Amino acid sequence: MFADRVLSGMRPTGSLHLGHYHGVLKNWVQMQHEYECLFFVADWHALTTHYDTPEVIEQSVWDMVVDWLAAGVDPAHATLFIQSQVPEHAELHLLLSMITPLGWLERVPTYKDQQEKLSEKDLSTYGFLGYPLLQSADILIYRATQVPVGEDQVPHIEFTREIARRFNHIYGRESGFVEKAEAAVKRLGSRKARLYNELRTRFQEQGDLMALESAKSLLDEQQSLSHGDRERLFGYLEGGGKMILSEPRAMLTAASRMPGLDGQKMSKSYENTITLREDEASVAKKIRTMPTDPARIRRTDAGNPEKCPVWQLHQVYSTDATRQWVIKGCKSAGIGCIECKQPVIEAVLAEQRPMRERAQLYLDDPVMVKNIIADGCEKARKLASETMREVREAMGLSYM
Ligand code: TRP
Ligand code: SF4
């Protein structure tokens, strides 16, 4: 199976547009063949900012899942689920809240930024302050190794790593840890046990980072280790206790900046979007009425593509040959703007066609969508329960 587990979530706060497709979904579709992937609808996260419009969230949840499927996210390859259907996330959030210093939350940059940006909303709530911690629970509960996120979310992953470390530091000291770790070393077999001990000594006595890395890859290669032993051996290596929660890494996706209809980044708040499955006539009309180089008032005025938002779409959608045609035609007034927009219209429609077709299958049979999500929730819950069992035990909460 896969050594890495990828987890990502999206907030259901409105329809997805081509910016989501180029910036996120294309990437998910690619990753589902390379990693074990879990993708979920972060409906609780949506409530932290949209608590007064729950109906928007409810509608967006299903639209969003259809958008994912339309974009090519394949339930045979990725687990799709809804956060609120896996209540273990809330339990972990609560338990982690016991050890989360308020100052850590207040210092997460998105906290103040979003409060200022969404100043029409009262975001001085407990839930909003806890947003990054809920996200940490989402990630840690699946022991995700990688989390694909945009630049703005990197501090949340950093925060998650710090929470995991703090948790392991406080609760990772199971009684008899050293004895259990040594027994786990023996179970590696004598040759590998000797190698592990050698590398561990080199790291602990001389700070040899190469030795640490070698020991880690040695452990990564051991298929037959139990989860408990694996975590003990990792913990023992670095001199700490057992690692109950593992630290994820942020996976920065090449920031493909999708231009909107006005040349700014495509974003709902700029009202410059084309939605993922927008109907053809509306797509054509939106592009046909896009602003162009303001210097081209009359058809006979020459223009400059560098000053035109349509040109940015050619960069995303057109071949080299078409782009040459645009540059030449625009600068010499050889082509008109409507003519110039035509290949963009066609390319966007061609990109959307398979998405619209796939979506139709699901729109015709909404039960299929519910079943995909029900399956995904069940799988996710199973994984989440395993982590929760260990977390409860570590925190002294396993009474039965
Ligand atoms: N905060 C993320 C965003 O706004 C959404 C999210 C919630 C998420 N939980 C997550 C992303 C866990 C990755 C992993 O985009
Ligand atoms: Fe923009 Fe094309 Fe018109 Fe030039 S010809 S101004 S690139 S739309």
Image: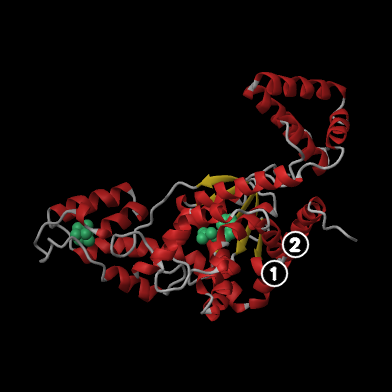
Q: Residue at x 33, y 71 (%)?
A: 284
Residue 358 visible in the current orientation: no
Q: Residue at x 39, y 65 (%)?
A: 117
Q: Residue at x 30, y 55 (%)?
A: 312
Residue type highlighted by circle 2: Arg
Q: Is residue 60 above or below residue 145?
A: below
Residue 278 visible in the current orientation: yes
Label 2 SS: helix
Q: Is residue 43 above or below residue 226?
A: below
Within 10 Å of disc 1 (Cα), the crowding (few <14, some 14-19, many 20+) is some
Label 1 SS: helix
Q: Are marks 1 and 2 in contact (CB under 8 Å)?
A: yes
- Residue 269 lies in what quarter of the image? bottom left
Q: Is residue 324 above or below residue 93?
A: above
Q: Position of residue 47 (x, y in %)?
A: 56, 72
Front residue of 221/199: it is: 199
Q: Quadrant of the C terminus?
A: bottom right
- Residue 361 lies in what quarter of the image? bottom right
Residue corresponding to mark 1: 85
Spatial CA distance of label 1 from label 2 is 8 Å
Disc number for residue 381: 2
Q: Confirm if mark 2 falls within 8 A of ligand 1.
A: no
Residue type highlighted by circle 1: Gln
Q: Position of residue 290 (x, y in %)?
A: 26, 67
Q: Position of residue 225 (x, y in %)?
A: 82, 38
Left/right of residue 311 with respect to residue 269 in the rendered view: left
